[in-house]
Each structure stands twice: as C-alpha cells, then as structure tokens.
Amino acid sequence: MGKVAFVFPGQGSQYVGMGKDVYENYESARKIFDKANEVLHMDLKSIMFEGPDEILTKTENTQPAILTLSIALFEVLKEKLDIKFDACAGLSLGEYSALVASGAITFEEAVVLVKKRGKYMQEAVPEGVGTMAAILGLERDILIDVLDEVSKEGIVEAANFNSPGQIVISGEIKAVEKAVQLCKEKGAKKAVILKVSAPFHSSMLIKAGENLKKELDKVEFNHLQVPVVTNVTADYVKKEDIKEFLVKQVSSSVLWEDSIERLIKDGFDTFVEIGPSKTLKGFVNKISKKLNTKVNIYNVENTATLEKFINDIRG
C-alpha cells in the first residue's frame, strides 16, 4: 500500500438505520454518537437508527447525522488498525469530517457547526424557488456553454463536478429546467431534476454562507496534522484559509473530480470512503479510469465493511 487518502461523503448518502450496528458493536463509536446527542441537545441517533426518513432528510438533521457516522467509523478504524493516512478530503459536508480527521477541528465543534450549516442552507431560499439537476454523459465544456446560454434567463450554475460524465447543476427552477432540456439536445445520456429542497452550491446560497461565517468566527482551527484537499480549489488548504473556503463552499462548485485527480497525480493509490453508502467509491473509480491509473478503493459504512477492510489491510 502506497499513499492513503481517507474520503468522506456528503449529503444524499444518508439512509434510515445507518450506524445502528456500529453503535451496538463498538464502544469508541458509541462515544461519538452519545457526544453528538449531548452537544446538539437532541436524540440524533434515534433519527438515524429509526427515522422516519422525512425527519432524517431534513438538511439540518442530515448533515450532523452523516458527520457523526463518518467520525464514529473513523474512531473505530484508528482504534482497531494501525493505518497511516496521508491526506483526506470530503465532498461538500464531508469536508467537515475531513477537517475533524485531520485534527483541524474537534468533532463537538464540527457537529454543532454542520447542524447550523444545514439550517442556514435550508432557509436561504424559499421552497419552490430553486432546484438541482444531475447531468450524465456530457462533456464539461459543453455543459459550461449551456449554462452560459441559459444564464440570461435566470440563475443556473455548476454545483458539483463529481466524476467524468457526472455533473450536478443548481439554480432557479425555470433556468434549471431549460438547462436540462438543452443538455439533452446537446447529447447528455441523462438529465434529471433531483428531489432536493434547495439549490445547493449556487450563488443563491450566499446568504447561508454569510450566516455560517458568524458561527465559524467563533471557532479556532488547529494546525492540520494531515493535509486536506478543499472543494473550492481542489488544492491543499492552509490553516489560515479554512474558514474562508468553508464559507465559499456553500455557494461555490464542488470540485470533487479535480480534487481526486490532484490526489492521484500526487501519487495516492489507496482511497478509503468512510461514511454512509458508497457513492464516492464509484466516483473515484471513474476518475482513476479516466486517468488510466489503477487505485485501490474501499468503503467503510457498517460493521461488515469495517471488519472486511480491517481484515484486508491486515492480510
């Protein structure tokens, strides 16, 4: 095993029941779940384990829930496995998990921050005003041209560059719908409106970033013990820039494909996705294939995948 990167998922990876078996099987994980309940003054773990889905998918619950499971799994890995990781990154919300893993911020501070982040993102745009869409199988350059053309009619922007051929757009409903139609005409294999409550990672969320900044100003970040690649620049973040980029991240494009490309080009050959689902595993796989580079990709989301990963690494 060469250079190892831990990567952490973002919103959309959640599901009811996530983390229940991890909570039941590992004391170090239990401490994280219980700490989340304590600092948030709510029964987050019951929402995660039992739902209902409509409560878990409220952005202000989803974000602390995903962070909590990601860090609970991370703590178990640290305890069970003497594995050195050389960098980390997280998709959108997952960047907070990466910053916790790097030692830049405590879990307690991060979980409080992301609950507020979720609330501000939810409240920034009234329901029924904005939306998002996934565009599959269209070249980035062609998509950018489409967005430029449609932007005369309303706000529509690139929200996530996830992997080759998978880009998410965000903005005002009519403009997004028009862009979807145009993307299909330009040859997209698929272009679909997503079931989301707000136009995340667009300029319509600048106000959410401004509110988040007030909360971030109360937090003192530590020196990074492990490098973190940030969504905003797809480059390694410096301690003094963390707050600025976390504010920008709310209303900027998530450069996930570029971030993973950077790590692969820097010699990273092993990626471990830590958190619910295995979305990032699929993204990393596509990005590495585009670069003609073979990498090892694991996902750790529950007791079974955790134990399998531990056994694989121990050989």
Image: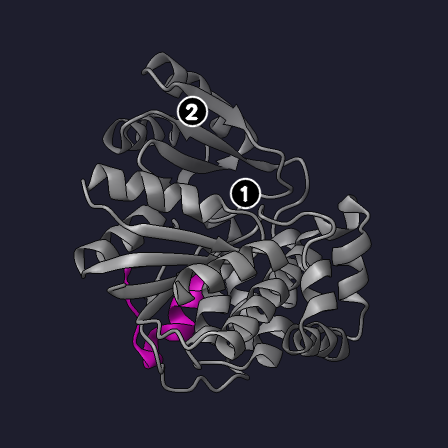
* Residue 241 is inside the magenta segment: yes
Answer above or below: position of 173 versus 106.
Answer: above
Give 148 or 122, whichever is nearer the viewer. Answer: 122
At which x and y percent is residue 167?
39, 36
* Amino acid type, mark 1: Pro
Q: Earlier in the sequence, mark 1 or mark 2?
A: 2
Residue 84 coordinates in the image, percent (x, y): 35, 75
> Quadrant of the rendered structure where residue 104 is?
bottom left
Residue 162: x and y in percent read: 38, 43
Magenta-drawn segment: 233-248
Going by the image, does 254 lie left or right of 12?
A: left
For disc 1, the marked residue is 199
Work out whether residue 243 can be spotted. Answer: yes
Q: Amino acid at mark 2?
A: Ala
Q: Which mark is residue 310?
A: none
Callout 2: SS: helix
* Residue found 30% across the figure and 55% down from its top: 259
**Alpha-carbon span between mark 1 and mark 2:** 14 Å
Q: Quadrant of the N terminus?
A: bottom left
Residue named by callout 2: 179
- How many other residues sit within 10 Å of disc 1, few (<14), some (14-19) or many (≥20)? many
Identify the residue at horizontal 32%, vertical 16% (top origin).
186
* SS at mark 1 in the image: loop
Snapshot quadrant of residue 271: bottom left
Q: Residue reaching furthest front?
A: 315
**Is 247 or 258 nearer to us in this picture?**
258
Q: How many marks?
A: 2
Is 201 placed left or right of 240 in the picture?
Answer: right
